[in-house]
Image: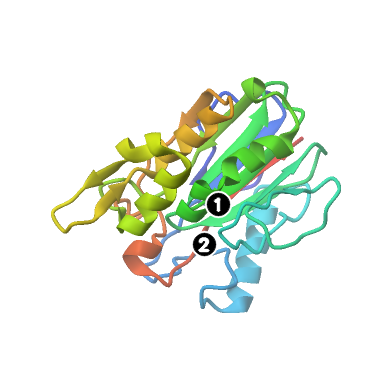
Amino acid sequence: MSAAPIGFVPDWPAPAGVRAWVTERGPGAGRYGTMNFATHVGDAAETVVTNRARLHAALELPSEPAWLTQVHGTRVLDLDTEGIAPADGAVTGRAGVVCAVLTADCLPVLLTDAAGRRVGVAHAGWRGLANGVLPAAVRALRVPPGAVLAWLGPAIGQTAYEVGTDVRDAFLRVAPESEGRFAANSRGRWQADLYGLAHDSLRAVGVTAIHGGNFCTFAEFGRFFSHRREGPCGRMATLIWRD
């Protein structure tokens, strides 16, 4: 690998041959930093193309990442059999195929099986979480849930994530036990624990090996983009692939 772009390797016990990288915003005070990878947020298109090319070269990626059009839904593509389409996750069992999602407060979730045969990533905002994007991603892996490893990447923390009663009600309708993931605040609204909700969603389908989840995109201004803090803004990329 040549000089790596600003970012980090997730800290999780992924099996040998499973590679992953999470980008950061890069230096610069502007709302797009120097490492925006999204084409839909108002940044210059040629800048995004250049950033993606630099990422590809610096990480020596085996292929161009499968950049999705994310729609806050629950569709997860199997890139072994499906082409690129609007979706909020992707999985593969083929070496050299790079799955990717873009985030700036929503939660990126990496997935693999303990043997490293299949990998994937999902984009989980509150709508996707409430409607089941993480169970959909686990199903798309087509391995026993007990063999799945998950890593929760940079997302907005509970102290910064104020939501209305509509958001809380959306979760309580499908999982009444999620009530404890919402703390009432002095404004009559709620502080939502996105990481806790993701844990609940994964555990409900049998995934217990869950790692990560100790970030706050809103609070970590110099490191991450945050739509809640500065939108419109850039997006970080979370990538996973097999050697």
Quarter residue 182 falls in: top left
Q: Quadrant of the N terminus?
A: top right
The residue at 64%/60% (across/down) is 54
The residue to which callout 2 is attached is 35
- Give the SS element for disc 2: loop
Specify the amino acid type for callout 2: Met
- Give the SS element for disc 1: loop
The residue at 65%/47% (across/down) is 2
Position of residue 143 measured from the top left corner of the image (x, y, whole percent): 73, 27
Q: Quadrant of the C terminus?
A: top right
The residue to which callout 1 is attached is 5
Contact check, label 2 and label 1, Cβ < 8 Å: yes
The residue at 30%/45% (across/down) is 158
Return the residue nearer the eye: 221 or 138.
138
Specify the amino acid type for callout 1: Pro
Position of residue 91 measured from the top left corner of the image (x, y, whole percent): 72, 43
Position of residue 117 measured from the top left corner of the image (x, y, whole percent): 77, 28
Return the residue nearer the eye: 140 or 79.
140
Task: Inspect this view and state whether residue 99 appears.
Answer: yes
